[in-house]
Image: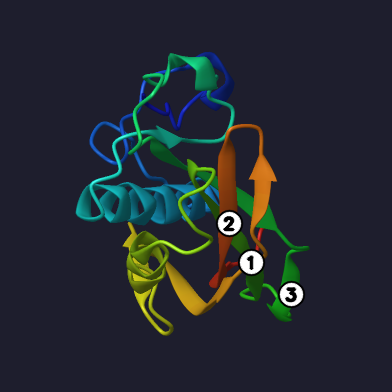
Amino acid sequence: MSVDYGLITESTDLTVIGGATTDNSKFFRNIRIALESQFNQMADDASITTRVFENIEFDVTSLEKGNLTNEWVRGTIIPAETTASSSGTIGRDLHQGIFQIDYYNRVGIGAYSDKLDSIANAFKRGSKLSVNDNVVRIRNVSLGVGRRDGAFFVRNIDVSYFAVTPARS
Protein backbone atom coordinates (compact mmCIF):
# COMPACT_ATOMS: atom_id res chain seq x y z
CA MET A 1 0.00 0.00 0.00
CA SER A 2 1.11 3.54 -0.42
CA VAL A 3 0.08 7.11 0.06
CA ASP A 4 0.80 9.82 -2.47
CA TYR A 5 1.24 12.99 -0.45
CA GLY A 6 0.77 15.15 -3.53
CA LEU A 7 -2.73 14.02 -4.50
CA ILE A 8 -3.85 11.74 -1.70
CA THR A 9 -7.26 10.99 -3.24
CA GLU A 10 -5.72 9.79 -6.49
CA SER A 11 -3.27 7.22 -5.13
CA THR A 12 -3.20 3.77 -3.68
CA ASP A 13 0.61 3.55 -3.52
CA LEU A 14 2.48 4.18 -0.22
CA THR A 15 5.64 6.17 -0.35
CA VAL A 16 6.01 7.34 3.20
CA ILE A 17 8.78 9.91 2.87
CA GLY A 18 10.90 8.70 -0.02
CA GLY A 19 9.53 10.52 -3.01
CA ALA A 20 7.22 12.77 -0.97
CA THR A 21 8.44 16.31 -1.36
CA THR A 22 7.98 18.32 1.80
CA ASP A 23 7.19 22.00 1.55
CA ASN A 24 7.31 24.50 4.39
CA SER A 25 4.10 26.14 3.17
CA LYS A 26 2.20 22.82 3.35
CA PHE A 27 1.91 22.39 7.10
CA PHE A 28 -1.02 19.93 7.06
CA ARG A 29 0.86 17.73 4.60
CA ASN A 30 4.08 17.82 6.64
CA ILE A 31 2.25 16.96 9.87
CA ARG A 32 0.66 14.00 8.12
CA ILE A 33 3.99 12.83 6.69
CA ALA A 34 5.61 13.00 10.15
CA LEU A 35 2.87 11.01 11.89
CA GLU A 36 2.42 8.41 9.15
CA SER A 37 6.18 7.90 8.83
CA GLN A 38 6.39 7.12 12.55
CA PHE A 39 3.29 4.91 12.20
CA ASN A 40 4.97 2.97 9.40
CA GLN A 41 8.17 2.56 11.43
CA MET A 42 6.13 1.42 14.45
CA ALA A 43 4.36 -1.22 12.35
CA ASP A 44 7.73 -2.47 11.01
CA ASP A 45 9.12 -2.70 14.55
CA ALA A 46 6.01 -4.55 15.81
CA SER A 47 5.99 -6.90 12.77
CA ILE A 48 2.53 -5.74 11.71
CA THR A 49 2.43 -6.10 7.96
CA THR A 50 -1.11 -4.91 7.20
CA ARG A 51 -1.43 -1.13 7.55
CA VAL A 52 -4.32 1.02 6.47
CA PHE A 53 -3.95 4.74 5.88
CA GLU A 54 -6.64 7.35 5.40
CA ASN A 55 -8.40 7.30 2.05
CA ILE A 56 -6.90 3.94 1.12
CA GLU A 57 -9.32 1.21 0.16
CA PHE A 58 -8.93 -1.92 2.29
CA ASP A 59 -10.96 -5.09 1.96
CA VAL A 60 -10.84 -7.06 5.22
CA THR A 61 -11.82 -10.20 3.30
CA SER A 62 -8.38 -10.07 1.66
CA LEU A 63 -6.85 -11.32 4.93
CA GLU A 64 -6.10 -15.04 5.01
CA LYS A 65 -9.08 -16.85 6.52
CA GLY A 66 -8.31 -19.09 9.48
CA ASN A 67 -5.00 -17.34 10.19
CA LEU A 68 -4.95 -16.99 13.98
CA THR A 69 -2.36 -14.21 13.77
CA ASN A 70 -4.43 -11.91 11.56
CA GLU A 71 -3.90 -8.39 12.81
CA TRP A 72 -3.79 -4.97 11.25
CA VAL A 73 -3.51 -1.30 12.16
CA ARG A 74 -5.26 1.77 10.82
CA GLY A 75 -4.01 5.32 11.32
CA THR A 76 -6.37 8.31 11.25
CA ILE A 77 -5.50 11.94 11.85
CA ILE A 78 -8.18 13.79 13.83
CA PRO A 79 -7.14 17.44 13.81
CA ALA A 80 -8.51 20.07 16.16
CA GLU A 81 -9.03 23.69 15.19
CA THR A 82 -5.83 25.53 14.27
CA THR A 83 -5.36 28.50 16.59
CA ALA A 84 -3.02 31.49 16.68
CA SER A 85 -0.26 30.97 19.20
CA SER A 86 1.08 34.47 18.58
CA SER A 87 -0.18 37.38 16.54
CA GLY A 88 1.32 39.89 14.17
CA THR A 89 2.81 39.59 10.72
CA ILE A 90 5.33 37.01 11.93
CA GLY A 91 2.84 35.15 14.11
CA ARG A 92 2.67 31.43 14.70
CA ASP A 93 -0.14 28.88 14.38
CA LEU A 94 -0.76 26.02 16.77
CA HIS A 95 -1.93 22.77 15.16
CA GLN A 96 -3.23 20.16 17.61
CA GLY A 97 -5.02 16.88 17.29
CA ILE A 98 -5.15 13.16 17.85
CA PHE A 99 -3.49 10.56 15.67
CA GLN A 100 -5.72 7.55 16.31
CA ILE A 101 -4.20 4.14 15.73
CA ASP A 102 -6.70 1.29 15.69
CA TYR A 103 -5.17 -2.12 16.41
CA TYR A 104 -7.26 -5.05 15.16
CA ASN A 105 -6.74 -8.67 16.18
CA ARG A 106 -8.94 -11.77 16.18
CA VAL A 107 -11.89 -12.06 18.53
CA GLY A 108 -11.40 -14.55 21.36
CA ILE A 109 -7.70 -14.13 22.02
CA GLY A 110 -8.09 -11.63 24.86
CA ALA A 111 -8.60 -7.92 25.27
CA TYR A 112 -4.91 -7.09 25.54
CA SER A 113 -1.93 -7.67 23.29
CA ASP A 114 1.69 -6.73 23.98
CA LYS A 115 1.60 -4.94 20.64
CA LEU A 116 -0.55 -2.22 22.23
CA ASP A 117 2.44 -1.21 24.34
CA SER A 118 4.75 -1.55 21.34
CA ILE A 119 2.54 0.86 19.41
CA ALA A 120 2.38 3.34 22.30
CA ASN A 121 6.14 3.14 22.88
CA ALA A 122 6.76 4.34 19.31
CA PHE A 123 5.07 7.65 20.22
CA LYS A 124 6.71 8.59 23.53
CA ARG A 125 5.66 11.77 25.30
CA GLY A 126 7.93 14.65 24.38
CA SER A 127 9.32 13.03 21.26
CA LYS A 128 9.75 15.13 18.14
CA LEU A 129 8.91 14.01 14.62
CA SER A 130 10.59 16.28 12.07
CA VAL A 131 9.73 16.83 8.44
CA ASN A 132 11.69 19.54 6.68
CA ASP A 133 11.59 22.49 9.12
CA ASN A 134 8.28 21.40 10.67
CA VAL A 135 8.34 19.59 14.01
CA VAL A 136 5.43 17.56 15.37
CA ARG A 137 5.64 16.99 19.12
CA ILE A 138 3.94 14.19 21.01
CA ARG A 139 2.01 15.29 24.10
CA ASN A 140 0.88 11.90 25.37
CA VAL A 141 -0.49 8.52 24.39
CA SER A 142 -3.71 6.99 25.74
CA LEU A 143 -5.30 3.57 25.45
CA GLY A 144 -8.91 3.59 24.26
CA VAL A 145 -11.85 1.33 24.92
CA GLY A 146 -11.83 -2.09 23.26
CA ARG A 147 -14.75 -3.16 21.11
CA ARG A 148 -15.74 -5.88 18.71
CA ASP A 149 -15.86 -5.12 14.99
CA GLY A 150 -17.08 -8.15 13.05
CA ALA A 151 -14.50 -10.95 13.34
CA PHE A 152 -12.02 -8.59 15.02
CA PHE A 153 -11.45 -7.04 18.40
CA VAL A 154 -10.22 -3.46 18.03
CA ARG A 155 -8.65 -1.12 20.54
CA ASN A 156 -7.46 2.39 19.74
CA ILE A 157 -4.28 4.08 20.85
CA ASP A 158 -4.70 7.87 20.80
CA VAL A 159 -1.56 9.93 20.19
CA SER A 160 -2.04 13.57 21.18
CA TYR A 161 0.20 15.83 19.07
CA PHE A 162 0.88 19.47 18.35
CA ALA A 163 2.98 21.51 15.93
CA VAL A 164 3.76 25.21 15.87
CA THR A 165 4.18 26.67 12.39
CA PRO A 166 4.47 30.10 10.82
CA ALA A 167 1.04 31.70 10.47
CA ARG A 168 -0.62 31.53 7.09
CA SER A 169 -0.96 34.97 5.62
Pinpoint residue 167: horizontal percent, then vertical percent: 64, 66
The amino acid marked with disc number 3 is: Ala
At mark 2, the secondary structure is strand
Pinpoint residue 11: horizontal percent, then vertical percent: 47, 17
Disc 1 designates what residue? 144
Q: Which quarter of the picture shows residue 168?
A: bottom right
User: Reading the chain from its start, which is encountered first: label 1 or label 3?
Assistant: 3
Q: Judge the density around disc 2: few (<14), some (14-19), many (≥20) Cα neighbours within 10 Å.
A: many
Foreground tag (3 vs 2): 2
Give the residue drawn at x 37%, y 26%: 2
Disc 3 designates what residue? 84
Give the residue drawn at x 32%, y 46%: 40
The amino acid marked with disc number 1 is: Gly
Distance Cα–Cα, label 1 vs label 3: 30 Å
In the image, is residue 104 above or below residue 155? above
The amino acid marked with disc number 2 is: Arg
Does the residue at mark 1 contact the one at mark 2 (Cβ under 8 Å)?
A: yes
Does the residue at mark 1 contact the one at mark 3 (Cβ under 8 Å)?
A: no
Colouring scheme applied when the structure was drawn: rainbow
At mark 1, the secondary structure is loop
Q: Which residue is more in the foreground, 87 or 14? A: 14
Disc 2 designates what residue? 155
Distance Cα–Cα, label 3 vs label 2: 33 Å
Pinpoint residue 142: horizontal percent, then vertical percent: 57, 75
Q: Which quarter of the picture shows residue 150?
A: top right
In the image, is residue 63 above or below residue 153? above
Q: Judge the density around disc 3: few (<14), some (14-19), many (≥20) Cα neighbours within 10 Å.
A: some
